[in-house]
Image (cartoon, grey):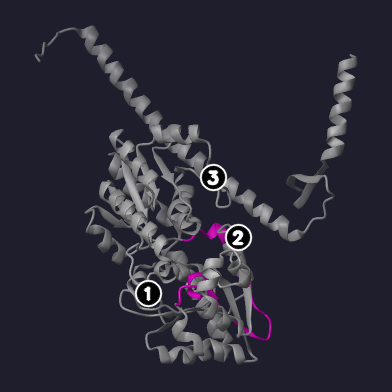
Amino acid sequence: MRQVRLDNKQLIKILKDREVEFKKAQELQTTAEKINKELTALGYKMNRLKEKTSQVLNKENIELSDFEIITEVKLEKGEPILEIVDQVEEYKKLILKKKADEKK
Amino acid sequence: MSKIYMINNGYHGCCYVRILLPAFNNGFLTDKSSVGSELCQDHALIERNLKQAEVVVFHRPESQEHLDLIKILKKDGKKIVVDNDDTFKMDDDHPLAVWTWDAKRVIITERDKCLDESLRLADLVTTTTETLKEEYSKINDKVIVLPNCVDPMDWDEPKRNEGKKVRIGLVGSTTFSYDYGHVKDVLRELSDRDDVQLVMFGWQNKVGRTDNPRVTEYFEKEYKFWDSLDIEQIPNCPSADYPSKLNEAKLDIMLIPRRENYFNICKSNVKFLEASMCEIPVIAQSFDKGAYEEITADMGFLIKDNSKWMEAINIMIDNKELRREMGKKAKEYVLNNYNIEDKAKLWDEAYQKLIN
């Protein structure tokens, strides 16, 4: 291997610019990795809170008919509200909508 | 993309503290998305995560498949971390040796061989106690202790027993591995008292027995002992439900008797940590290098002389205020010293050193 030194001002500037951009990219990469990790941790936290919600709801013994499921648990004016859907009724609605669409 | 990928195994309770808590709090990727979820079965996703990872962490890689994977990953330039929190060195006191028939003992020895080879190949070994560190250091000189921790998020406000009887409990392994053998008389005496309700939360439970007829057969004599007591039985439960079940048990006192043997010397203090999160004061076995030596007199009792169990229990039974104070103090101590929110960085720092 051998080295050649060039006296080229344009090349010096380009290489310096490259250095600056590379550093910026590196910094962004580090930030992105950090944000990614934080997002992953938040995702886990959301999963765990979801599990805890299920545990609490299981203890509440909410009465559901054979075809009903809880689709959403939310806070409304500070009060927990459960949305319960009858799957058979939903399916009926879907079929009726499909039929109506076909007629169009 | 996270540079760390953590791999669970079938030991759900161990993996919760050794894999999931560090992963959840550091944002490391792992093959289990929550405590209650199943292991990821999406092999393409696992493969992608493994390819992108720089450090792959295995908890107790005891199978040939684990070992083969470690070899492949090492060839691919990945750094390997092996974590384990129990000794697999078989002696006659090892809980598995106590009730395992010969054919299975061979399997356990094979598992131990795979584990030893994985430990040898690892770039870093992490474990729970100084005794285990000593054991693994004979195989690999890069061993560090990362303590078991608690996550406050998993523990609700402690529930109180407001009933007339003092609820005294034995939990998990202390109900199983003959660790209670030397306190049988104490348990009998407590069972006969009108002011005490004995509670058993664990494997000797009547429901759990039927799950494993082989164990039932082996423990027949022990079951007779348990069944002769007036004892409330709480079935073993999935690890996701454990914190709330323990809290709902509303124990006033937890007994942690242990035989003094190598397996128990290797064990961590996790039972004390869990009890403390429910503000349950413990009366725990004390022996040289034992897990509970850190418990001070304001948090609970340590029993070295086995004739002193009843004395300590009576002090606690008679003094509700003392029990409550001890429980609160123990929780405060555990949160100050074993809170994963503070300690998670220990895992990150250890793994980053492998990358840089």
Label 1: which residue? B294
- Which SS class for mark 3? loop
Do the numbered discs 2 and 3 sit on residues whose CB atoms are within 8 Å?
no
Q: Is residue A37 left or right of residue B87?
A: right
Chain on which label 3 sits = B
Q: Looking at the rendering, which quadrant does residue A98 occupy?
A: top right
* Residue B46 marker: none
| Magenta-highlighted residues | B150-178
Q: Label 2 is placed on what type of residue?
A: Asp
Q: Earlier in the sequence, mark 3 or mark 1?
A: 3
Task: State the separation of the CA atoms marked 3 and 1.
Answer: 33 Å
- Which SS class for mark 1? loop
Quarter of the rendering occupied by the C terminus of chain A: top right
At x 39% / y 68%, what residue is drawn?
B97
Label 3: which residue? B33
Quarter of the rendering occupied by the N terminus of chain A: top left
Chain on which label 2 sits = B
